[in-house]
Structure formats: structure tokens, C-alpha cells
Image (cartoon, rainbow, N blue to C red):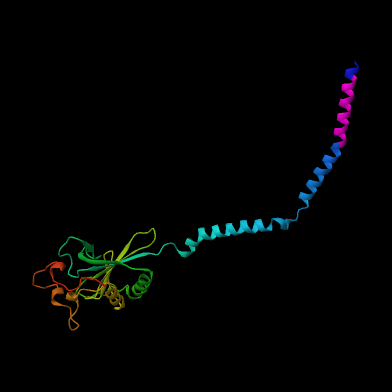
Amino acid sequence: MAFLNAEDANASVKTGDEQCREPERRSRAVFKWTVNRRRPVTADVPRLKSTRTVLVLLIVICISPAFAGGPSDRVVIHLLDPRGAIAGEQTVPIEWKGGKADLIATRRLNVAEAKKLRALLRKELADDDNVPFCGHSPAYAVSITPNDKPTTTVTLCGTCGTWAKRGDLRALHGKASLEYLDALLPIPDIFRPVAGKPVEILNPFYGGERLPFHQLGATNGGEP
């Protein structure tokens, strides 16, 4: 019984010590909570600024292509045999009456070239159906492919001063477009006018043998 009383006494003393320490622990907890609660907001400013900067950069990266209009349109010019499809191995539609012409050369334009050519075309591709009798013998085809949209092709004829698209033939108001195309992808000398008149080989009623372009012995084949 005495042993039990001693144990009980020791237990009581231990419990008393813990009760004495309890206010101290509570005081420390209250002090720590108070310190954290009173922490100034400005202490988080650097971290908030850093987070905000990252978010702004991500937004700019995401929306920049939208404001820029996406990738530039692809503009390709084709040099054609104005006589039409002679060889018939590689042809391009002339966009009028189901006709085709032999392809001589092709060039994809850079951004500056495409911008200049499109400005000239907007000015000279008139909605004028008063076309000359000679018809349409194009030396150039211009294909424009906007981003994620179908390709649009127009053909231009310097002999008749006409242009065509999807079966419609119209008068060409001006020569600047053709001159710029000639600078980008020169017409072979064999097809160039002589003394301001079309060469005999381009005459629709030409009675000579119609040889493919590569057999004509041309000195240049559309190389710029």
C-alpha cells in the first residue's frame, strides 16, 4: 500500500509539473501566432512581383501570334509558257476555259516581295469585263495561300492585257504587276516582244512547228 501511495504521489507531482509548463507552451503558441498574424503584407511583395512577371510573360507569349496575324501568307509565282500546254508534262491551269500551260519555273516570294506584289495586284486587277478579242495567253500565275485557307490563283497575260481567276476573264489595268513579276522571274527572251509587237511564235495562227520550251534553244528559262 505504501508503494502504491508513493507511485500515486510521483504521478501527482509529474502531473503538476506538466500543468505548470502548460501556460508557458500556450504563451509561446500565442506569441508565434501573433507574430505570423502581424507579419506585414509587404514581406510577400517580392514573391508576388515575381509571380506576376511570369504570368505576364506567359500571356504575352500566348497572345502575340494572334495580334501578329499568324504566319505570313505563302505567295508563289509560276512562269508559264504563254503558248499553252505544248509538252504537257507539268502544267498549270490558266484559270480560263479549262486551259493549261506548261510550267517553266517557280519561285516562292519572301515577305517583302509578297507584300509589294499584292499591293500592285490590288491596284491593277480591275473588275472590268471589257476584254480584248485576243483572249488570254498568260505568262504568269500567282498563287496565294493564306494561313489555314485554300489557295487562290490568278493568271496574268501581258500580250492581251488580261487576268483570270476561276473561269472569269477581266482586263488588266496597268503593267506594273507584270513588270515586277518579270523582275522576280524573267520571261525568256524568246517570248519577249520585238519593237513593241508580240513575237511570231506567240501568234495564235502561227504556222510553224510548236516545240516544247526546252527544245526552243532559249538562252534563259526564267532564272532571276
Residue numbers of the magenta segment: 5-20
Is 26 situated left or right of 92 in this image? Answer: right
Instruction: Give the quarter of the image for residue 101.
Output: bottom left
Q: Does 144 appear above or below 13?
A: below
Q: Does 37 appear above or below 97?
A: above
Residue 75 in picture, x, y percent from top left: 34, 66
Question: Residue, x 84% and y 37% (percent of image)?
Answer: 22
Q: Report the quarter where the N terminus lies.
A: top right
Report the residue that reaches farthest toward the bottom. 195
Q: Is residue 11 magenta?
A: yes
Q: Pick whichever, 60 or 120, lies toward us.
A: 60
Q: Report the quarter where the C terminus lies.
A: bottom left
Residue 69 in picture, x, y percent from top left: 45, 63
Q: Is residue 12 magenta?
A: yes
Residue 50 in picture, x, y percent from top left: 62, 58
Instruction: Give the quarter of the image for residue 7.
Output: top right
